[in-house]
Image: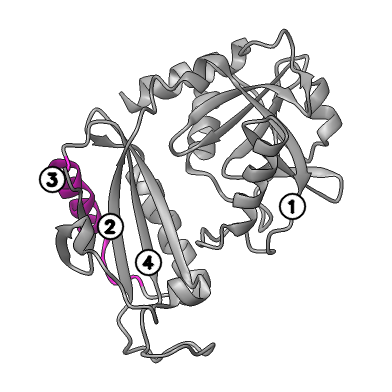
Amino acid sequence: MSRTVYLNGEYVPEEEAKISVFDRGFLFADAVYEVTAVVNGKLVDFAGHFARLARSCRELGLPLTLAEDDLREIHQRLIVENRLTEGGIYLQLTRGNSGDRDFHFPSSQTPTTLVLFTQSRAVVDHPAASKGIRVVTCPDIRWQRRDIKTVQLLAPCLAKAWAEANGADDAFLVEDGFITEGSSCNCYIVTADKTIVTRPLSNNILHGITRKALFRLGEEHGITFEERLFTPEEARRASEVFISSATTFVWPVVSVDGQQIGDGKPGEITKLLRRIYLEMVG
């Protein structure tokens, strides 16, 4: 069955959802995006995703003309129209089509392009959550404003291709000798004293919505987080390693650069965090 897609105020079959070849999202990656998870037909932390979308738009001077309640209504209608029980909703907002290819920003009168579509997939009982994933490290070649969630994702795609070519599931990105984040996730290590270490927020990493929720849950459950830089060697020697993102929630990492983490199975802290996160989302 064809999905219903939202495009600039209309709900249309996916095969009819078309944008101009002159759209700046297509020509310049002049666009931002968000992915909101859906569990049991309900949005997960939509307010957090809207707040980050609004921030990304402010940083780029990209008009966001719809209010939070309006966007929430669009998300909820797509859930109903596509009978989505579990998965995610992708949103992309571009600076629109000014009628030709021109590096200069178009006038403020140029309408933006807003697209949303659903993706049905397992997020609660995904095999990676119980088995864990293998990661390799590679250089971080992305631009310097990774805190803005733009569609400039060629570098993460190359990192994932590098991981696959080296027998791994994903990649941790390294800059100046320290891990920044994963190709599409935030990264964490667990020390021998059960402290969770993750990189501090800055322009160098995405400000993860799931990351923020994990900090809050950690405080409620007496789990200690420490924000500091850490190296690939620290990750390889850690008691546990895990990742977080909007649609993985919490996934354990069982090897880094071919070196087994702990006993090669998901660790207790990682399993606890995933459990209490799932309890939160219901």
Q: Residues within 10 Å of mark 2 (few under 14, many from 20)?
A: some
Task: Report the residue marked by disc 2.
Answer: 68
Using the image, determine if residue 103 lies above or below residue 251: below
Residue 50 x %, y %: 37, 54
Task: Report the residue marked by disc 3.
Answer: 81
Secondary structure beneath dot 2 equals helix
Residue 128 visible in the snapshot: yes
Q: Are the residues flagged by discs 4 and 2 in contact, CB closer than 8 Å?
A: no
The CA span between labels 3 and 2 is 20 Å
The answer to which of marks 1 and 3 sits earlier in the sequence is 3
Q: Are the residues flagged by discs 1 and 4 in contact, CB closer than 8 Å?
A: no
Question: What residue sits 39% from the left and 19% below the top?
Answer: 125
Overall secondary structure of the magenta section: helix
Q: Is 69 colored magenta in this rendering?
A: yes
The answer to which of marks 1 and 2 sits earlier in the sequence is 2
Frontmost residue, 13 versus 212: 13
Q: Quadrant of residue 106?
A: bottom left
Using the image, determine if residue 104 lies above or below residue 156: below
Indicate the amino acid at tag 1: Asp
Indicate the amino acid at tag 4: Leu
How many marks the image carries: the answer is 4
